[in-house]
Image (tube, rainbow, N blue to C red):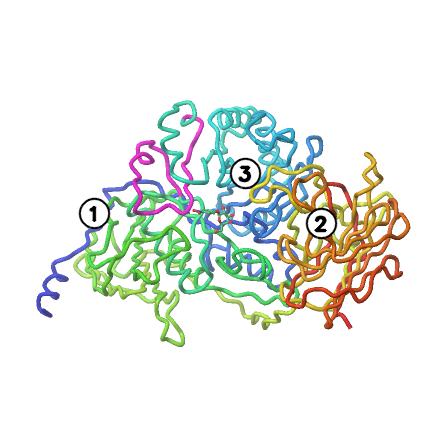
Amino acid sequence: LCLCQLCLQAAVELVVDRTHTSSTFDGVGGLSGGGATSVLLPDYAEPSRSQILDYLFTPNFGASLQLLKVEIGGDSQSTDGTESSHMHDSETVDLHTGYEWWLMQEAKKRNPDIKLYGLAWAFPGWVGEGSGDPFKFPERTAHYLTEWVSGAKSEYGLDIDYLGIWNERASDSSFVQVLRKTLNQAGYAGTKLVVKDGDMGICNDLLKDKAYADAVDIVGLHYPSDFADFSACNQLGKPIWASEESSSYDDMNGAACWGRVINSHWVINRMTSSIMWNLVGAYYHGTNWYASSMMTSVQPWSGHYEVNPVIWATAHVTQFTKIGWKYLANGSGSGELPHGGYYATWVDPSSQNFTMNFVKISRDHASCTRPPLPSFEVEEETLTVLLAPSLHAPPELQVWYSNFESYDDAEPPVFQHSTVQVRDSRFSIKVPIGGMLTVTTIKTGRKGTFLSRIPPSSPSFPLDYMDDFQTTEDSRNARWFADQIGSFEIHRAEDGKRSLRQMVPLLPIGWTDKGSRGPMTLIGMREWQDIKVQVSFRLPVATHGAAADAACVGARVDQMWKNGVVLCINRDGHWELLNSGPALQGSSAPAPVPIASGSTRAIGSTWHVLSLEVGPSNEAQGALDGRQLLSNVPVRDMDTGFAAIGANGWFPIEFRNFSVSKAP
Ligand code: 147
C-alpha cells in the first residue's frame, strides 16, 4: 500500500507554463457596510485607529486589500445599523455624512492603487416618491447614485471604479441603462456597473436582454456556490465576481473558508474577484453577525483590537499579486490538487514575477456561512511542481505558510516565511490538511506588526458617560452611537450650538426595515441592565399639527428596540412607558400597550430634559425637567440592553447633553 501511494505521488507533477494565460485578476477586497459595520472605527483611540487601517490597507503589511467596497448610505437599517445618505431629501446634497468617505480616503492614502466600489442597500424615500420602488423613476435614482459618484470625485478626489445597483434586491434593465447614460453624461464613463449583487438568476436575465447586458460590465454574485451551474454566467463573456462572500467568523474557521474560496472560485468557475463581508467588525456585540469580519475592533474607548487569522489568509494572495495580473489556465498553473484542494497561479504581464497559491481545507472546516458544500475528502500530499522555461524561475522562491486547522498547536503556523530551492526546473512542497501556501518570486511579503503593544481588552463601555455633542464635526454621527432606524447627525441649531438631529423626513426604501417603530440610535452594551439615561431634547415646530410627535429615551433595548424599557413623551405632555420602541406614526403596526402612562403639561417645541432609570429592583423611574413622571413601575427583570434615544416619527427631533450612568 505504502509503495503504491509513493508511486502515485511520484507520478503527479504539476506543470506551470506562463504561455497559457487566462483571465485578468480583479483583486481581493473587503466590504464596509451593509450595514454600519465600521461605525465604531472613526472614533477609535489613536494610535490603534491608524494601525487597524494599516492592517487592512497598507501594501505588504497585513490584508493589503486591493479593493474596498462600501455601502452608499440609504438612511435605513442594513444589518448592523443605518448609514446616512448623502441626500436625505431631493434638494440637499451633503458629502460629509457617514464615515465611508473617510474610510475610502484612508484606504487610498495607504494604497493609491486600491479600487473603490459603491453599492446601495437602501434608498431615501424621495427617489421613489413614496412608492417604495427605486426603479419607478429611473432618472431620479440614477441622479441620486451619480451624485454620490461625482461627490466622491469633487469633494475628495476619489474615482469610483465600480458601482452596483441594489444589494440583494431587484435589478432592472431599463434602470441600469438609464444609470449608464446618466453616468456617462456626467463624465463618469469610467465607472463600471456591477449587477446585481445577488443570485445567479441575473445571468439568464442578461442573456435574454442585449441592451441590459451591454450596459453592464461585471456580474457580481453573492455567496456563489462553486458547485452550481455557471454555464449561463460564463456565456456572457464578462468578469464574474463573488462580490459578497464569507460572513464567517474572524477565527481560524473563517480563515479556512475564506482562504479556500479566494482560490477555488477562480479554479472552478473563473471568478476573478472575491470581496469579504465584512471588512472590519466595528459594530457592537448584540447587533447582527457580531465578529464576522476580517478583523475585530469594538472598543473605541480602549483602543484594543484583534488581528485575526482572516487577515493572513487574505495576505496569502494580496501581498503577492496585483490587479491586472493574469491567471494561468487550468492545467498550466491552476487546478485541483491530486489529493484534494486547489492551486492557482498568477503572472505579472509586465515582468517575470509569478505567484502560486495552494490551499487544502478539510470538509469540516471548509464551509463559509453559506452556501452548503457537498462532501469531499482531502489528504496531505507532497507536490512536485515543474516550472516551464517560460517562467524564467529564479533558483530560490519565497514560501509563506499557514495552517488554519492546527487547533492543537499553541502557536499555529500563520503566515510563516521560508524559501524553497528550484532544482531541475522543479520544486517540491508539502501541503498538509488545513494548509494555505504561497510560493512566489515576490520578496516584499511581510507579517506586519507594530512596536507598540495593542492596548489590553477592556470590554465594558466606560461609565459614567456623557456627550454634549458640541465637539463633533457637522454632519457626522455622534461618537459611539450606532443609528438603527433613521439617521442622527450633528448639525448647528439657530443658537449656533450643535445638536444631534434625526435627518430622515420620510420612510426610506428599506432593505429589511419596512417601518414599524420610530427612529432610534443606541449606545453602550447589549449586556447593560441597571442604568440611568438622560437627554435634552426638542421637538420640531409642528408643521402639520402633529400633537402626537414624541421624544423617547430607552434602557435595556435590543438592536431594533423590539424589546426594552422606553419612556416617550409627546408634544401635549402625554407620556407612556413601553416594553419596546414606539410605533411609528402612520404605520399599520399595532401600538405597544403601555406599562404605565400619564399626563403632564404640554411641552411644545422647546428644550426639555427627559430621564429614565431602571434599577436593580427592576423598577423604572422617569422624570421630565427633573420632575418625577413615574416611579417604582415594575418592569421585566430578565431584560438587558443598550441605552437609546429616538422618536415616534420621521421628524427632525434634536438632542443635546446625553448621559448614561449606572443606576444607583
Ligand atoms: C447579506 C447582506 O448583503 C449583508 O449586508 C449582510 O447582512 C450579510 C450577512 O451574512 O448578508 O445578505 C444575504 C442574506 C441572505 C443570503 C445571502 C446574502 N442568502 O440567504 O443566501
Q: Which residue is mark 2?
A: 582
**Residue 491 — which label?**
none
Q: Position of residue 444 (x, y in %)?
A: 41, 58
Disc 2: residue Cβ within 8 A of ligand 1's nearest atom: no
Q: Which residue is mark 1?
A: 331
Q: Is residue 425 left or right of residue 57?
A: left
Q: Is residue 285 left or right of residue 261?
A: right
What kind of residue is marked 1? Gly
Q: Which residue is mark 3?
A: 159
Q: Indicate which disc, 1 or 3, sits on the residue closer to the N terminus.
A: 3
**Does 225 appear in magenta?**
yes
Quote the CA–CA distance across marks 1 and 3. 37 Å
Q: Residue at x 82, y 57 (%)?
A: 610
Disc 1: residue Cβ within 8 A of ligand 1's nearest atom: no
**Residue 46 visible:** no
Mark 3 against mark 2, which lies toward the viewer?
2
